[in-house]
Image (tube, helix red, strand yellow):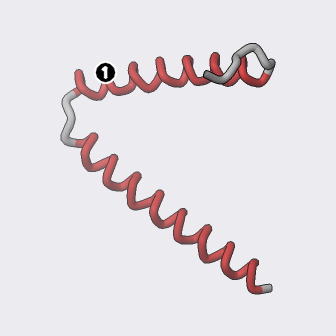
């Protein structure tokens, strides 16, 4: 029972922290220009593609750790 309570408390703290981070990020982005937001979106899209490719390679065992 104790571990369940600790895990629930830890989960709630992480959720609250994530909500605070999201609120801060939204505030920063509201101040950004359209061009800056477009560049940011493009960057994260590219990073998502790269991450997906590397993850796929790792899942299939085609990448050796350096």
Q: Quadrant of the C terminus?
A: top right
Q: Is residue 6 left or right of residue 49?
A: right
Residue 56 picture quarter = top right
Kindly identify the residue that appears in the image at 23 percent across and 21 percent down: 35
Q: Is residue 2 left or right of residue 38?
A: right
Task: Specify the farthest residue to the bottom.
Answer: 2
Image location (x, y in percent) of residue 54: 63, 19
Is 30 drawn above or below residue 59 in the view shown? Answer: below
Kindly identify the residue that appears in the image at 75 percent across and 85 percent down: 2
Label count reads 1
Kindly identify the residue that appears in the image at 66 percent across and 23 percent down: 65
Q: Nearer the viewer, residue 1 or 62?
A: 62
Crowd tier of the residue under label 1, counting other residues whose Cα lies within 10 Å: few below 14, some 14–19, many 20 or above: few
Residue 62 picture quarter = top right
Image location (x, y in percent) of residue 38: 31, 22
Image location (x, y in percent) of residue 5: 70, 82
Image location (x, y in percent) of residue 30: 24, 42
Residue 43 picture quarter = top left
Kindly identify the residue that appears in the image at 57 percent across and 71 percent down: 12
Q: Quadrant of the N terminus?
A: bottom right
Task: Specify the farthest residue to the top.
Answer: 62
Q: Nearer the viewer, residue 35 or 49?
A: 49
Is 14 drawn above or below residue 21 in the view shown? Answer: below
Q: Is residue 40 left or right of residue 14?
A: left
Residue picked out by circle 1: 39
Question: SS for tag 1?
Answer: helix
């Amino acid at each position: 029972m104790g571990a369940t309570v600790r895990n629930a408390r830890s989960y709630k703290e992480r959720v609250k922290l994530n909500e605070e981070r999201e609120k801060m990020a939204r505030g920063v982005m509201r101040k950004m220009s359209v061009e800056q937001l477009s560049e940011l979106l493009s960057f994260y899209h590219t990073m998502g593609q790269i991450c997906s490719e590397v993850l796929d390679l790792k899942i299939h065992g085609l990448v050796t750790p350096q």
